[in-house]
Amino acid sequence: MPESVAPKAKSLQRVLGANCCSGCGLCASISESGIEMTMTADGFLRPRQIAPVSTQVDRLIADVCPGMKLTQTSREGDDHPLWGPIVSLRIGASTDQALRHHASSGGVLSALLQYLLKSGVVDYVVQTAASDQAPLENVTVDSRSHDEVFRAAGSRYSPSAPLENLDHFLEQPGRFALVAKPCDIAAARALARHDPRVDEKIPLMLSFFCAGIPSLGGAQAILDRLGVKPNDVNAFRYRGDGWPGRATASLKNGEERSVSYAVSWGEILSKRVQFRCKICPDGSGGFADIACADAWHCDENGYPLFEEDDGRSLIVSRTGRGEDYVSSAILAGAIAAEPFQINEIANMQPSQARRKRLVLSRLLAMRLLGRKVPRYQGLHIGLAARAASAGSHLRSFVGMMKRLGIWRRSHN
């Protein structure tokens, strides 16, 4: 076989061997049909090489894969050790009450998308939505109307690979907004260093605070809790239709069964998050132009309350371009918002703060056991680590050692 062709892509071997794949799908998009995304037995989307790829493509994958490296170069606004680049910070909600109720946390992301379409900034939106054929699973869609954005609104706590067909969208006429997980946006930013079409075709990238990607088995476990068989499900919502909303299975016989967010996420889904998410230094969408999150109300001890209420979104403009569009959407009446103080985010998002502070100790455990680790640059994991106690780091370190030991035994 010619030297310019890689029978087995070293990049894939490394990231899969270290269990650091995030499942974004970018490698499949740039592989020239040499890689496809498949659902594994443990319920995650993973790349599978189906044909040789060139050594040039292999090197490109190694440079853009978020399971291999993340390089934060943006320095617009304040670059916070925990929360990344911030130009402005607000709390708000969609002024469309139906959208605010339907979406997961105030509807601001969806309201911004509708505004971008209406104002002609973009021709369509690339985002994740529920699959019509498999209601627990996700598909990537191109939303081109107000109603299509509305239908796609709401969190989808199962694997998605929104970059799997990115090359297809980059080849199509028109410009689009990309809405995806933080790791997906980071990968798209990395690709922009190599492919000028990314910046030409995508005027805005939007993300959200992500607590991790649960396996498809998490959704199946929710159905088990509800006493529902997968074949009986007509539609499935992980959240929304209220804030935080309930995980709801709509059955083919017209019945609905649901469990609270505290049960669906707190007891089931959060226990099934993929490994790469355990060492993520950017759960808050630091590579996006705009990132949104749940602006949880807190109790007297500063801990989030998950009681049903009108949805509120934390709105983080991370670039000047993102801030321009947020400001314009406010002026147009698409969203209503007010300024917010950065020191209050940790109360609303304590798990995000904790994970960022403990990433370094988890990476050290991986290194000690001889595991390959992603390279993180410009993400201030050292500064973030200083905010955690020695005891927290020790528990995190030991926990990771145990987790890796269990994983090693299960794969031998």
Image: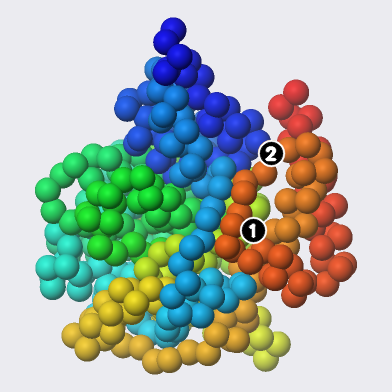
Q: Using the image, tell me which numbered label, if any, was put on residue 25.
A: none
Which residue corresponds to mark 2?
Answer: 372
- Position of the C terminus by quadrant: top right
Residue at the (61%, 54%) spot, across then down: 376
- Toward the viewer: 242 or 292? 292
- Would you identify the image quadrant in which residue 121 lies? bottom left
Q: Is mark 2 on a helix, strand or loop?
A: loop
Which residue corresponds to mark 1?
Answer: 267
Kind of residue indicated by mark 2: Lys
Instruction: Work out whether residue 51 can be spotted.
Output: yes
Is residue 45 rendered to the left or right of residue 81?
left
Kind of residue indicated by mark 1: Glu
Q: Which of marks 1 and 2 is in front?
A: 2
- Would you identify the image quadrant in which residue 53 lies? top left
| C-alpha span from label 1 to label 2 | 30 Å
Residue at the (47%, 58%) spot, across then down: 182
- Where residue 192 sits in the image (x, y, percent)? 35, 51
Examine the rendered structure and indicate whether residue 296 appears above or below residue 206. below
Q: Earlier in the sequence, mark 1 or mark 2?
A: 1
Examine the rendered structure and indicate whether residue 135 appears above or below residue 337. above
